[in-house]
Image (cartoon, grey):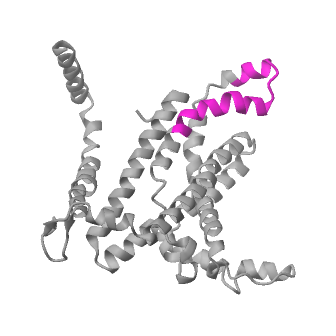
Amino acid sequence: MPIITTTKRSLVLKALRKDWQLYSLLVLPIIYLVIFKYIPMIGNIIAFRRFIPGGNIFGEEWVGLRYIQMFIGDATFWHVFKNTLIMSSLTLLVCFPAPIIIALLLNEVKSKKFKKFVQTASYLPHFLSIVIISGMILQLTATNGALNSLIEFFGGKPILFMQDAKWFRPIYVGSEAWQTMGWGAILYLAALTNIDESLYEAAKMDGANRWKQTIHITIPGILPTIVTLLILNIGSIMAVGFEKVLLLYNPLNYETADVISTYLYRVGLQSSNFSYATAIGLFESIIGLILVFSANFLSKKYTDNGLW
């Protein structure tokens, strides 16, 4: 064992000396992660201590599981928890396959001009801020907006989209798919370029049509990328977009729009109940961690691909 350890250490040092310029590029990202991601984790201690604004940053006194018991017995929390699961599950089901489908379709397009046009048009929403996206959604779904004007043109009655709770989820998921599918397709298009063209030539000689080539060559070729991104998406399943929900929801659609992140905003920042909000956030993070490990375990077991 000491020989193996020494050998590994010498190989690492040799690599560092050889490519130190490249490794130096990691310094700033590591500093960023330490300062803004790891050091703030210490603040999770106030989930078990009573925190008073202006007092000790680590809380005034130890209260144990008091705040955890509070949100476990809080009916409002379980309502927003259910909303979060439904919203995030719908987002995953719709938004995760969308970039894959776009990439596969673009891969079959022969016209370079049309392909570039579709790529540009589908990438553009990603570069718009959440505020602009939310403003566009509110304008489109307003009583006298474009959607209701179209409905009236065909003889229908205007729909109060943002005042009716049942419409919030379809609007949120649809706008999320529109905003992310083009940008997400970039990774899959890059993965498609790594597939050996000789595989397609061999498949053609065996009489495989384009559909069979896609099923047996293209999709297996990008499967590692799909699995990696799926695991990452599953890990963040509890983190529904806070900014967009906050900008779109209102008291009339709280029933389906209120999620954990907006609930934390109200109880943590607006009500200054920081310890209670931290306890909920810690619970949310633990669920995300369990989901990542579970998804990675199942992926390694059934597909031999995973994050580690």
The C terminus appears in which quarter of the rendering?
top left
Location of residue 11 with respect to 91 vertically, above or below: above
Please, what is the dominant secondary structure of the magenta stretch? Answer: helix
At 87% from the left and 82% from the top, the residue drawn is 155
Is residue 125 rendered to the left or right of residue 72?
A: right
Q: Name the foreground residue: 196 vs 278.
A: 278
Q: Residue furthest bottom?
A: 144
Residues drawn in magenta = 200-227
- Identify the residue at horizontal 13%, vertical 67% (top origin): 61
The x and y percentages for residue 253 are 57, 78
Position of residue 211 measured from the top left corner of the image (x, y, whole percent): 78, 34
Residue 272: quadrant of the picture? bottom left
| Magenta stretch contains residue 221 | yes
Q: Residue 65: within the magenta?
A: no
How far from the left and from the top, in percent, is residue 164?
A: 65, 79
Residue at 73%, 81% in the rendered image:
159
Q: Taking 286 as reference, is 80 above or below it? A: below
Residue 49 appears in the rendering: yes
Classify residue 276 as left or right of residue 178. left
**Count of labels in the image:** 0
Residue closer to the observer: 289 or 217: 289
Q: Is residue 303 visible?
A: no
